[in-house]
Image: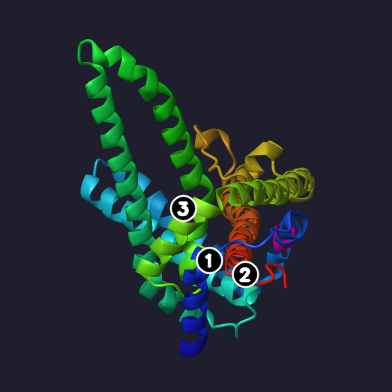
Amino acid sequence: MAGSEKHERDAGTAMSSPMVSFDWWRALIRVLASIEAVRDGRALYVLLATFCGAGLAMACAQASLARDDLAWAIGQGAAALFVAFYGVNAAGLLLMDRALARPARDVVDAMEDALGIGHRVLLTLLCAVLVGVLLAGVLLGLYWLSSLPRIGPWLFTLVVPLTVVCISLFLMAVAVVVAPLTGPTVWAGASAIEAIQTVATMVRTHLLQAAVLAGGLSLVTGLVGAVSSLLVVIGGRVMAEASVLVLGVDIPPEALMGGLIGQGVQVRDPSHVAPEALQYISAATVGGGVVFAIALVLPTLVYLRGVCEIYLTLRRAASGEDSLR
């Protein structure tokens, strides 16, 4: 495994080589084919456990905040972020294994490996933040020079278009390269320095390709999310109507559907609701929350597999290989 990881790192640093002709159509096909990620049981399990754990920690943080217990709220909120970050990285490692046709690692191994590589992702993102701060400082300096008498108005003529172009390109680079492709770069085996170099090279030579492929991935992810939401709403409505008829409880069907859309059901006056109805409402909220988590996991799986495919496609094209072999 160490030799294969070294090969992946060497291939990742090869992105500085001249880019061969890019096959747009077949690249989009690879990205659209990421929809098959919904069949990856291990990654699905990891993401589901991650969302449930992070959601539970966030709910505890909100409860602590409501009690004005700020210290516990901050700690539980940090725990939610910790679980979400490393859980997503573990799922990303499993999906990258499948994308690279590497031997699939166990879930426990994926979690342990995620703990060992998470800092690489954070360091790369931190470098992007530092670049943004540096860019902001340069632009503020130009604005200060523009405030000087005589030369200020003339200089401002150049500062205006320069500011618009720089900010637009920076935001585009963050949105289509830095944010989505930093993780896949590390999941493929790059070290922190190699990840920074690879992401910087992608921004310089592959910004247009990354933007187009990211747009295609957004369409696929949105489609999966819309279909999942539609099925959940339709199935939930049928479930709620049938439950009221079969169980014989006098409650509105909407009270049984709150968990399906990620909302808790609060009864303002429990004295007006039968005790057995309250029990069914609570059970439906918990069960619906599980369904909501599953529906949220599916588009996330597709997105993570899609960014893996985008990274591999751009990396292979830049290294002179057949990007779609």
Residue 240 visible, this orientation:
no
* SS category of the residue bearing label 1: loop
Q: Which residues are magenta?
A: 31-35
Report, in whole angstroms, how far the alpha carbon at label 2 lies from the one at label 3: 22 Å
Nearest the eye: 82 or 155: 155
Left or right: 297, with 190 as reference point: right
Q: Nearer the viewer, residue 312 or 92?
A: 312
Label 2 or label 3, whichever comes before in sequence order: 3
Q: CA distance from mark 1 to mark 2?
A: 7 Å
Point out residue 217 in the picture as x, y percentages from the top left corner.
66, 51
Residue named by callout 3: 178
Q: Is residue 64 magenta?
A: no
List x then y, in percent, for residue 262.
57, 45
Reading the chain from its start, which is encountered first: label 1 or label 3? Answer: 1
Q: What kind of residue is marked 3?
A: Val
Tag 3 secondary structure: helix
Residue 320: numbered disc: 2
* Residue at 48% across, 89% down: 3
Q: Can residue 319 be spotted in the picture?
A: yes
From the image, tell me which residue sits under label 1. Answer: 17
Contact between labelled residues 2 and 1, with CB atoms less than 8 Å apart: yes
Give amino acid for label 1: Ser
